[in-house]
Image (spheres, rainbow, N blue to C red):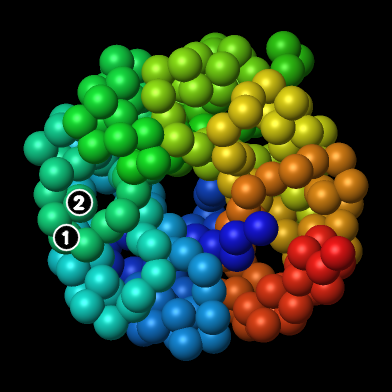
Amino acid sequence: MRVIARLDIKNEHVIKGIHLEGLRKVGNPLDMAMDYYMQGIDELLFLDSVASLYNRNNIFSVIRAASEKVFVPITIGGGLRKLSDVEEALDSGADKVAINTSAIQNPAFIEEIATKYGSQCVVASIQAKHTQNGWEAYTESGREKTDILVETWCKQLQDLGAGELLITSIDKDGTKLGFDVELMEMVNNSVTIPVLASGGFGKLEHIDALCEKTNLSGLCFASALHYKNIEIINIKEHIKNKYEQH
């Protein structure tokens, strides 16, 4: 199971909030990426939190700088709307691209990326919120409701060629109260491609609660790492000792 550091970026600062709201600056993305790399992180996920809102992406420079010093897979997301954006992201040093809003607006975009660059390049990102109808997909960093059910959307994204799914629980984001196990279990049972869980981690027991019900490919960590509540080595040793030794 991959241990992934998630860095949400706004105006060249790493930010963090709760439920994707009340965002505050927590550090410099390059410094934090280097720190996590030196600690042994498996992958880095950079997301421009306002790129879709303002129709631009300005973290390519961050990716270029990081890729010169950090030698683990890098995923970039936020504001990627056309193949030329994906090309620039990959040229900047990213290994994969995360697509959310653009996929909702134009599902064929996922297929276009997969056809040109391969499914392994495409991370379909879903911001999920529990409503009276079940879990629904949101866009614009959790600001815009789509009325699309997450379970249906997951299956469609897989059919379109997405290589993996990044599922962010808006309800759990930043709370450190545990992953949304029911949501992740539902997604895990709906698709056969790798699934990454994001939102809610606060202590090692939260990994156990999730792993009892799912078989996920990776876990994303933000607040717990940014605020130094736990070290990457502790997370990795816990996973190795409990789930990777036979």
Residue at 43% in and 58% down:
45
**Residue 152 in view here:** yes
Q: Vertically, is 142 above or below 230?
A: above
Residue at 47% in and 64% down:
43
Q: Mark 2 points at which residue?
A: 89
Quarter of the picture containing the C terminus is bottom right
Q: Say which quarter of the image contains residue 202.
A: bottom right
Q: The residue under label 2 is which amino acid type?
A: Ala
SS at mark 2 in the image: helix
Residue 103: give x, y in percent of width and height: 35, 24
Left or right, 15 with reference to 177: left
Residue at 40% in and 18% down:
160
Residue at 37% in and 34% down:
119
Total tally of numbered discs in the picture: 2
Q: Are marks 1 and 2 in contact (CB under 8 Å)?
A: yes
Local crowd at mark 1 within 10 Å, few (<14), some, or many (≥20)?
Answer: many
Q: Name the residue under label 1.
A: 92
**Residue 127 in view here:** no
SS at mark 1 in the image: loop
Local crowd at mark 2 within 10 Å, few (<14), some, or many (≥20)?
Answer: many
Q: Say which quarter of the image contains residue 207.
A: bottom right
